[in-house]
Amino acid sequence: MKKVYFACSIRGGRDDAEIYGNLVTVVKKYAEVLTEIFADKKLTVAGMDKPAGDIWSNDVRWIGQADALIAEVTNPSLGVGYEIAKAQEMGKPILCLFRPEGERKLSAMIAGSPSATIFEYSTPTSAEHAISTFLSTIRSRQTT
């Protein structure tokens, strides 16, 4: 089964936690989500109760184990940007999901990246086709 690192804002704001959870539910139809905890509504802007170095080590390890990275990028987050850059550095396929609402603009560094596929969506359900199509184009690192 394919493995996905799901990235979303944690310390940058948890206003979209319910949406993150719904997106993870969609991704789980097609792949194992290594970072399902990130979408948990119980997780606050304080993040995980671990030292920063441990969080960094775990996240980089998970990115390395993943076949792809899917990031919800509507709420700007330094951590998500870093994770996207790490995935790009490791040669991982990247899907960025963005909800264009009101005055929100996607970062030019994300929008202009030749390594990322960008998909604008309005609801997690409307993102499902993009997620399933993206995941169908990548290969699992595991042999079955």
Image (tube, rainbow, N blue to C red):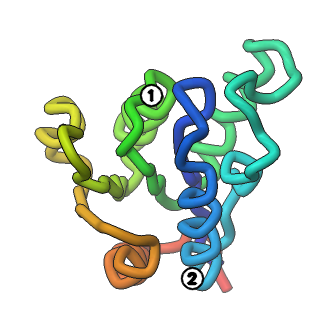
Secondary structure beneath dot 2 equals loop
Asked if 32 appears above or below 45 in the picture, the reply is below
x then y, percent, for residue 90: 43, 40
Q: 21 left or right of 77? A: right
Residue 120 makes an appearance in the image: yes
* For discs 1 and 2, the disc positioned in front in the rendered view: 1
Instruction: Specify the quadrant of the image occupied by residue 128.
Output: bottom left
Q: Which residue is mark 2?
A: 30
x then y, percent, for residue 123: 40, 71
Residue 136 makes an appearance in the image: no
Q: How many marks?
A: 2
Secondary structure beneath dot 1 equals loop
Q: Which residue is mark 1?
A: 77
Q: 31 left or right of 49? A: left
x then y, percent, for residue 1: 65, 79
Residue positioned 38% across, 31% down in the render: 76
